[in-house]
Image (spheres, rainbow, N blue to C red):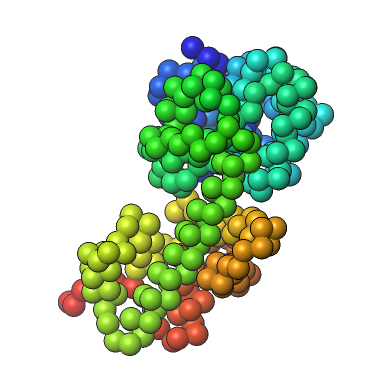
Amino acid sequence: MKRVGLIGLGDMGIGMAKNLLKNGFELTGFDLREERLRELAQLGGKPSASSREVAETSDVVFIMVLNGQQVKEVVLGENGLCQHLKPGSTIIVTATIHPSEVKELVQPLSEAGINLMDTPVSGGKSGADNGTLTMMVAAKEEIFKDNKTILEAVGDKIFHVSEEIGIGQTVKAALQAYIGTTFAAIFESLVLGVKAGVKAETLFEVFGSSGVSSPLFKNCANLIMERKFKGTGSHIGTMYKDLGISMNMAKENGVAMFTASAAYELFRSGISLFPDEDNWSIVKLLEQIAGTEVSYEPLEA
């Protein structure tokens, strides 16, 4: 069985670590936060002090950090994976970054004899915790097949979207445009209905039974009505970053993004007001403008 490394033990990474260990993989992990390293040790994984240590004890390494600059530092930096992984090893980039950023890794890794899998994921913290992530894999067919068992430890919907590195991130950027605009529509429609006199519970029941019902809607609307805006595993900064990638890709390809650009501006306003909260906090901005609140009505005494 291959030895696995994981760099980035945030909400997503620690959930992936749990499932890799559950499936019997020997796991070494690294994060800048000591508390996350302690959590990994409690799960049965081996904490390390650097990316270099992960490289020296792993055959396959997942990278689940926040942005492209961090990915490049992990791979190409002084203590990076490119210098310290043995030839024939594989790097799986599950972080969401710009397609051009993952493409920058191709040549140096190829020269070092290291395989690369461009594999962003969707499903959020619950998907990471439950091992049910959707994975968009761009990699050579033989590399994909050789590592599929490892992917199956953390995901249950695994799509081999291309052999061309960058296509995985391209699919994810298009998906995030869809998700971001969906969030904006949910926020606005709930505020509209409540302001016009409809109970939030009624809107939830009707919307949730209609053609637009989805786990995304039900989770989002329920958290809004429960007024849970922190610690739900979907930080507003992550979605804002992802929508920025989508908008940059649209500009590069000459694609008009009317609704996605509006969603991006809404998230920009939201992150200014609620920088430490989760995606659903944006509804509070719309509530302030409308003078209403989307919440469960208290039970009568």
The quadrant in which the C terminus is found is bottom left
The image quarter containing residue 237 is: bottom right
Does residue 254 appear anywhere in the picture? Answer: yes
Which residue occupies the extreme top position in the image? 1
Name the side, left or right, on which 30 lies relative to 130: right
Residue at point 44%, 32% (across, down): 154
Which percent across, then down, holds residue 101? Answer: 71, 43
Q: Is residue 81 left or right of residue 19?
A: right
State which quadrant residue 75 falls in: top right
**Residue at position x 76%, y 30% from top?**
107
**Residue 93 visible at all:** no
Residue farthest toward the left in the current orientation of the protein: 301
Toward the front, the furthest residue is: 254
Q: Is residue 29 above or below residue 169?
A: above
The structure residue drawn at horizontal position 50% and vertical position 85%, both measured from the top left corner, is 289
- 89 with respect to 155 (left or right): right
Figure label count: 0
Residue pictured at 65% horizontal, 23% vertical = 115
Place of residue 42 in the rendered image (x, y in percent of width and height, measured from the top left): 48, 27
Instruction: Give the percent coordinates (x, y) of residue 108.
Output: 77, 28
Residue 122: give x, y in percent of width and height.
Answer: 47, 45
In the displayed structure, would residue 244 be above or below residue 164?
below
Relative placement, left or right, of 187 versus 36 is left
Q: Quadrant of residue 132?
A: top left
Residue lying at the far right of the rendered structure: 78
